[in-house]
Image (cartoon, grey):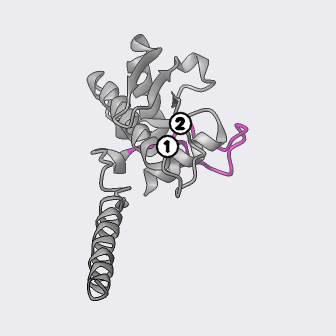
Amino acid sequence: MDKKIPKIIIVLGIVFIAILSLYLFLNKTPKKEDETISVADQANIQTIEDVPTDPTLSNGYSIDTSSEKVLKSTDAIKKLESNLPYIYSFTSKGGILVNIVIPRASQVGNEWVLLVNMDSIDYQVSEDHPDHIPNKEAFFEGVDNVLSFLQQNQVNPADVFIQWGDREITQSQSSKWLKK
């Protein structure tokens, strides 16, 4: 009997290590943050940060409203006017209900920026939180939807200045996600 005890302890130790190794292997969550996100036109998206400015102008914002880019954006948004407001809801692959609202230009305050609001996405979730990736992916699914809406209406997304949200935190996080 005394000779069996060390063998039993060794076998139990090996089984314990095997189970622990299997548990750690199965629960290992790989960081697939950028692998799962694909927006074909991401590099061509213009945000309000890209609006041409001229410090010599006195229009209150130093926005060069006569620049070719601003005029292109204005014309593109005019093409959309008959299809605005655009309101669309969907459930993201991560289970987040996303509501997209694009109001008419007359409700935004200028005619050269397309305001896109996407509600229910948590733009403040920290990068190390488990909800970060599902929220970022939901944002990009919404971006894909908006780009499709523009293209369906014969508008090149690269011609439009898009303001992602009307709150600073939304604009800041959206720009951060789009620039990565």
Picture coordinates of residue 124 (x, y %)?
A: 60, 45
In the rendered image, which residue does mark 2 sit on?
A: 163
Position of 6 relative to 26 (above/below): below
Label 2 sits on what residue type? Answer: Gln
Secondary element type, mark 2:
strand
Residues in magenta?
A: 45-67
Q: Is residue 63 visible?
A: no
Residue at 38 percent across and 55 percent down: it is 33
Question: Which numbered marker is on residue 87?
Answer: none
Picture coordinates of residue 58 (x, y %)?
A: 72, 41
- How far apart in space, not on screen, are marks 1 and 2 (Cα)? 6 Å
Horizontal side of residue 167 vs 90, given as left or right: right
Label 1 sits on what residue type? Answer: Thr
Q: Quadrant of residue 80?
A: top left
Farthest bottom residue? Answer: 3
Picture coordinates of residue 160 (x, y %)?
A: 42, 35
- Give whichever of 19, 36 is nearer the camera: 19
Picture coordinates of residue 1 (x, y %)?
A: 28, 83
Q: Is there CB contact under 8 Å for labels 1 and 2?
A: yes
The first of marks 1 and 2 along the sequence is: 1
Q: Is residue 41 magenta?
A: no
Quadrant in which the C terminus appears:
bottom left
In the rendered image, which residue does mark 1 sit on?
A: 47
Residue at 43 percent across and 17 percent down: it is 86
Horizontal side of residue 88 vs 61, given as left or right: left
Position of 152 relative to 73 (above/below): above
Position of 14 relative to 144 (above/below): below
